[in-house]
Image: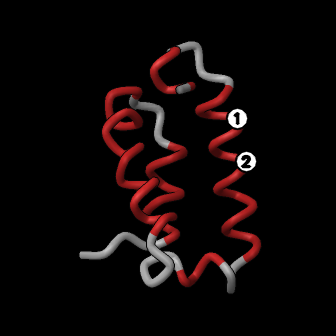
Amino acid sequence: MEPSMEYCLAQVLQKDVGKRLQVGQELIDYFSDKQKSSDLEHDQTMLDKMVDGLSTSWVNSSNYKVRL
C-alpha cells in the first residue's frame, strides 16, 4: 500500500519515539516522490497540519535522534 498524506500525518503525530524514528525515512521517500505525494499540492490544510506536527512533535522533541 502506498502511503497517503493521512497516513504520514498519523505517523508524525504518534507519541511512540521508536516508531517516529522508523518512519523518518518513509516520510522522506514520500515527500521526494512527486507521484506519491501529488496530494500535497491539492490539500493545503493537510500540509499545514503536517508541518505543524513536524515542528511541534519532532523539532521540539526531547529525544535528539527524533529532532535530527
Identify residue type, mark 2: Asp
Q: CA distance from mark 2 to mark 1?
A: 6 Å
Where is residue 42 shown, x and y percent of the image? 68, 86
Marker disc for residue 56: 1
Where is residue 65 shown, x and y percent of the image? 45, 20
Residue for point 44% across, 72% down: 33
User: Do the residues bearing badges 2 and 1 touch, measured as CB atoms within 8 Å?
Assistant: yes
Question: Which residue is nearer to you in this view: 41 or 16?
Answer: 41
Where is mark 2, residue-wise?
52
Dot 1 falls on a residue whose secondary structure is helix
Image height check: is 63 above or below 28?
Answer: above
Marker disc for residue 18: none
Where is residue 32 shown, x and y percent of the image? 48, 65
Does 52 sit left or right of 66 as displayed? Answer: right
Image height check: is 59 above or below 24?
Answer: above
Residue for point 68% across, 24% down: 60
Residue for point 65% across, 29% down: 59
